[in-house]
Image (spheres, grey):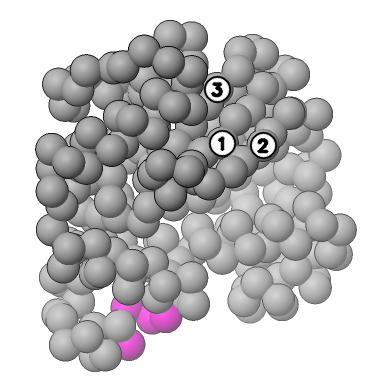
Amino acid sequence: MNAYSARIGARSGALLWRVRPTGAHRVVPDGALDRMWSGGRLVVAGPDTAAVVVRGGQETVGLRFPPGVAPLLLRTSAADLRDERVELRDLVPTPVPPGAPAALLEQVYLDLWAAADPDRDLIRAAAALDRAADRGDPVAAVAERTGVAERSLRRTSHLLFGYGLKTLSGIRRFQRAWDLVRAGADLADAAARAGYADQPHLTREFTRFAGLPPARLASIRST
């Protein structure tokens, strides 16, 4: 089993997580961007569209950016980081302070925020899009509610999350179903409760995002 723990950082208010895999494990898409410290390297993990298999037992400590915030601090589009792992120093010239990994990640986050002074309107827009994705709202309904053209919504979603709202909603639905499957729900029940049309629909989406059908995914180490 992978040793995983998470907490809210006292200084940053962001999610801090730590994992030490005991072998190869599969990291599945979750619609988020993280900064990770592992092996003396500070890396930005972009939004994934497919599972990534990680091998080895080296501990990794990460800080999860709040929804839509990473591109504003890193001064790049999330779409440019999609399915990528990039050294932080290749994106922004940020000094890396000494200290334990969790404290280091929080300090760098605070330094990035102070330097970028991110646009509060965009942060609010990111939070609204994040909630819409969690609910599975259709793009047309979001456009009508906000008075923003669908094409503009798509551009904003790509900037802040790395993909369009429809894909983000699909990843969030997959994550809901995956949580249910890991908790012991049968596939038909997980499909209904997560919002899929039926069990075959769930299986297709698991294969799309995780590279494996749900029963097979549940039988191996995953995070």
The quadrant the N terminus occupies is top right
Find residue 144 and report its horizontal and vertical position in percent. 24, 90
Q: Label 3 vs label 2: CA separation?
A: 11 Å
Left/right placement of residue 53 relative to residue 62 reads right
Q: Which residue is mark 1?
A: 17
Is disc 3 surrounded by few (<14), some (14 to 19) or many (20+) residues within 10 Å?
A: some
Instruction: State which tag comes first along the sequence, 1 or 2.
Output: 2
Find residue 138 and report its horizontal and vertical position in percent. 38, 81
**Residue type highlighted by circle 3:** Thr
Predominant SS of the magenta segment: helix
Instruction: State which tag comes first along the sequence, 3 or 1.
Output: 1
Magenta extent? 137-141
**Residue type highlighted by circle 2:** Ser
Q: Are marks 1 and 2 in contact (CB under 8 Å)?
A: yes
Q: Nearer the viewer, residue 89 or 146?
A: 89
**Residue type highlighted by circle 1:** Trp
Residue at horizontal 15 percent and vertical 52 percent from the top? 118
Element class at badge 3: strand
Q: Which residue is mark 3?
A: 60
On residue 5, the disc is: 2
Is disc 2 surrounded by few (<14), some (14 to 19) or many (20+) residues within 10 Å?
A: few
Element class at badge 1: strand
Q: Label 3 vs label 1: CA separation?
A: 8 Å
Residue at horizontal 40 percent and vertical 75 percent from the top? 132
Residue at horizontal 66 percent and vertical 13 percent from the top? 57
- The relative height of residue 145 versus residue 26 in the rendered view (above or below) is below
Q: Is residue 85 visible?
A: no
